Image: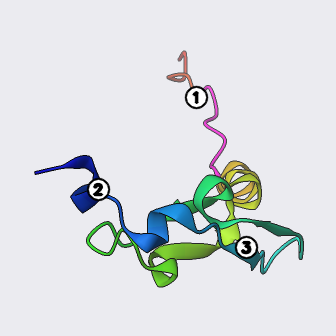
Amino acid sequence: MSFDDEIELEHLLFFDRKCRVCGKVKNLIEDYYMTRKGRKTLPSSYSYECKECTIKRIKSKKKIQSKWEYPDW
């Protein structure tokens, strides 16, 4: 198997996508998480929310663990 057989057209093209949350246009491959690992070359396998917005959403929804102590009777 040669190196030329492993490269496809999708590997050479860079797609841009507009984030649904922040509205900025970013690089699809670098700035979005992959949601469907079986379809690596399709643009539809990437999420519509950029990595930065995803991290902000996860941090804001994370439960704050309280330091609960057993009551001292």
Compared to residue 68, the image places residue 6 above or below, namely below
Answer whether residue 35 is visible to the viewer in this image: no
Which residue is nearer to you in this view: 68 or 49? 49
Q: Which residue is mark 3?
A: 16
Label 1 neighbourhood size at 10 Å, few (<14), some (14-19), many (20+)?
Answer: few
Compared to residue 28, the image places residue 73 above or below, namely above
Marker disc for residue 4: 2
Compared to residue 45, the image places residue 11 above or below, namely above
Q: Secondary structure at mark 3?
A: strand
Q: Earlier in the sequence, mark 1 or mark 3?
A: 3
Q: Which residue is mark 1?
A: 68
Mark 1 vs mark 2: in front: 2
Q: Secondary structure at mark 1?
A: loop
Q: Is residue 54 left or right of residue 73?
A: right
Q: Which region is colored magenta?
A: 62-67
Q: Earlier in the sequence, mark 2 or mark 3?
A: 2
Amino acid at the residue labelled 2? Asp
Q: CA distance from mark 1 to mark 3?
A: 47 Å
Q: CA distance from mark 1 to mark 2?
A: 60 Å
Amino acid at the residue labelled 1? Trp
Q: Is residue 70 left or right of residue 53?
A: left
| Residue 53 point in image, percent of width and height | 76, 60
Label 3 neighbourhood size at 10 Å, few (<14), some (14-19), many (20+)?
Answer: some
Answer whether residue 71 is visible to the viewer in this image: yes
**Residue lying farthest top?**
72
The residue drawn where x is 52% and y is 72% is 46
* Marks 1 and 3 in Cβ contact (< 8 Å): no
| Residue 57 point in image, percent of width and height | 72, 60
Which residue is nearer to you in this view: 54 or 6? 6
